[in-house]
Image (tube, grey):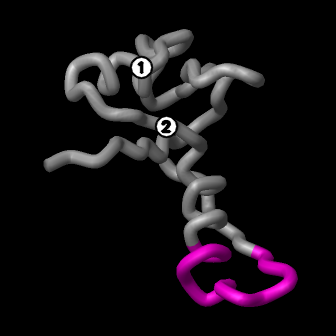
Amino acid sequence: SLAGIGIGLTGRMESGTRKIGRNDLLPDWQGRDLAADLAAVFQVSSGIANDADAAALAEAAFGGGKGKRRVIYLTERTG
C-alpha cells in the first residue's frame, strides 16, 4: 500500500505555502498545490519541495552526509 507521496520539483515554491512558484519548465503549474491534489486523489499524506533542497536533505539524512555535523551539497541547474 502507498504510505505517502514526496515530490521534488525544479524551480521555486511560493514562500510559506506548498504552491508551485514561477517555473520556466512548467509555466501552467504556477500557483498550483500539486501535493494537495495528489493527496486528495490517493488519500495519503504528501509533501513538495524544490528538487535540489530535497536531494540535499536526503543526502544529509541518509547518504554521504549521514552523521556529519555539516554538509555542503551542490547541484547544477536543470535545462
Going by the numbered disc 1, the residue's amino acid type is Ala
Left or right: residue 69 versus residue 41 is right
For label 1, count other residues whose C-alpha is less than 10 Å away and answer few (under 14), some (14-19) or many (20+).
some
* Mark found first going from the N terminus, 2 or 1: 1
Residue 43 placement (x, y as % from top left):
25, 26
The prevailing secondary structure element of the residues shown in magenta is loop
Left or right: residue 47 versus residue 68 is left
Residue 15 highlighted magenta (yes or no): no
Query: Which stretch appears magenta?
Result: 59-72
In the displayed structure, 70 sits above or below 2; it is: below
Residue visible at 57% across and 41% down in the picture? 49
Quarter residue 26 falls in:
top left
Residue visible at 51% across and 37% down in the picture? 48
Left or right: residue 51 versus residue 46 is right
The answer to whether mark 2 and mark 1 are in CB contact below 8 A is: no
For mark 1, give the secondary structure.
helix
Q: How far apart are the alpha carbons under marks 2 and 1?
A: 8 Å
In the displayed structure, 32 sits above or below 60; it is: above
Give whichever of 16, 74 is nearer the camera. 16
Which numbered disc covers residue 26? none
Identify the residue position indicated by label 2 in the image.
47
For mark 2, give the secondary structure.
strand
Which numbered disc covers residue 36? 1
Residue 13 placement (x, y as % from top left):
64, 28
In the displayed structure, 6 sits above or below 56; it is: above
In the displayed structure, 68 sits above or below 78; it is: below
Going by the numbered disc 2, the residue's amino acid type is Gly
For label 2, count other residues whose C-alpha is less than 10 Å away and answer few (under 14), some (14-19) or many (20+).
some
Residue visible at 55% across and 22% down in the picture? 20
Of all residues shown, which one is farthest toward the left? 1
Residue 19 placement (x, y as % from top left):
57, 19
Of all residues shown, which one is farthest toward the right? 69
